[in-house]
Image: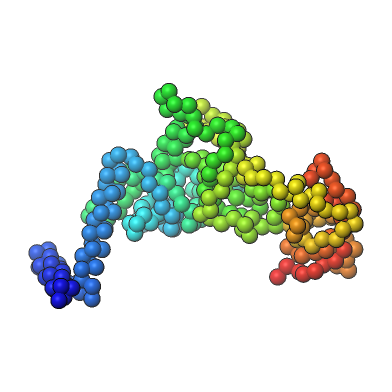
Amino acid sequence: MKKEEQGRQAEEVQERAGKESGRPMGILTVDAAGAAAAGRMEDTVWHELVNAGRTRKILSGPLGGIERLDAGWVVAVIYYKGCRILIPMEEMMINLEGDGRENSDILNRQTRLANNMLGAELDFIVRDLDEASGSVAASRKEAMLRKRAQFYLGQGDNPPMIVPGRIVEARVIAVAQKAVRLEVFGVECSLKARDMAWEWMSDANERFSIGDVVNVKVMKVNGDTADNLKIEVSAREATPNVNRENLFRLRRQGKYVGKVTDVYRGTYFLHLNCRVNAVAHSCNTASLPAQGDEVGFLVTRINEDREVAEGIITRIIKRRS
């Protein structure tokens, strides 16, 4: 009886609210009390966004879309607890360095890279709110500059928290075949796949995904202001070198299975299943292997300086599907 009484009370609240507002009554849900709770949750989220805008608090949410508004503005859309957050593309602070399109329009370059970042967790600071339309404008740039000042430059008598040699966490915000884009406490940088792990890989997508958090070692920090700050990091240097450890377990004339990770001017680069990198300058096969093929490999030399096994591809076990 108690649940029935609560349900009737909730229905009366919805009906009374509809009459007072003068708006047509919406669909009455089976769980009327649950609908009221959902409404309170929306109010709570809006109140949180209002307070975050006043205090300039850094929030974060997944990048859910890229849109062109009727006025022509291109914006990134972040969904924060069900609320749409709009970030103008010029406030995304996307690092365009090394994208290979230096002669193209800047907005197109930014939009292209932003599309590759869909699903990534991004920081933002609320700039403006319109309660009537329920729209929220924000800036990722302001959040990134705040983090840079806090972690790289130090504040007051506090020394910088991130310096060369320190291992820190980084967000994976985009992944391509040969490169991974990271955000390291407000600084974007792009790493080649070979700098992400000691093991060679044919496609970084096989190991890393947008949304991953990886450890990286800070190699260099350049710049004395938040605007011109640049860093160099290595995810490989932040992990033990298992490739070198496993290399000395191999035997000359031993045969092993591996995958071709790359082919360049007749040289084949492989990663063996025993977690060792290898190089083959010749193949004893009826047809030439390709990137991604599983092959048999005969070790002829252990190259300690380059930390690779050298040898010959003896057979193609399985073609890449």
For this rendering, which residue is in front, 224 or 37? 37
- Residue 22 at x, y = what percent? 11, 66
Name the image quarter holding residue 266: bottom right
- Residue 36 at x, y = what percent? 21, 65
| Residue sitting at x 26%, y 58% | 42
- Is 314 situated above or below 128? below
- Residue 85 at x, y = what percent? 36, 52
Q: How many marks?
A: 0
| Residue sitting at x 45%, y 49% | 122
**Which image quarter is the C terminus in?**
bottom right
- Is 217 situated above or below 284? above
For this rendering, which residue is in front, 181 or 170? 170
Q: Is residue 308 left or right of residue 75?
A: right
- For the rendered model, the colour scheme is rainbow
Residue 101 shows in this picture? no
Q: Is residue 24 left or right of residue 265?
A: left
**Which image quarter is the N terminus in?**
bottom left
Q: Is residue 105 left or right of residue 32?
A: right
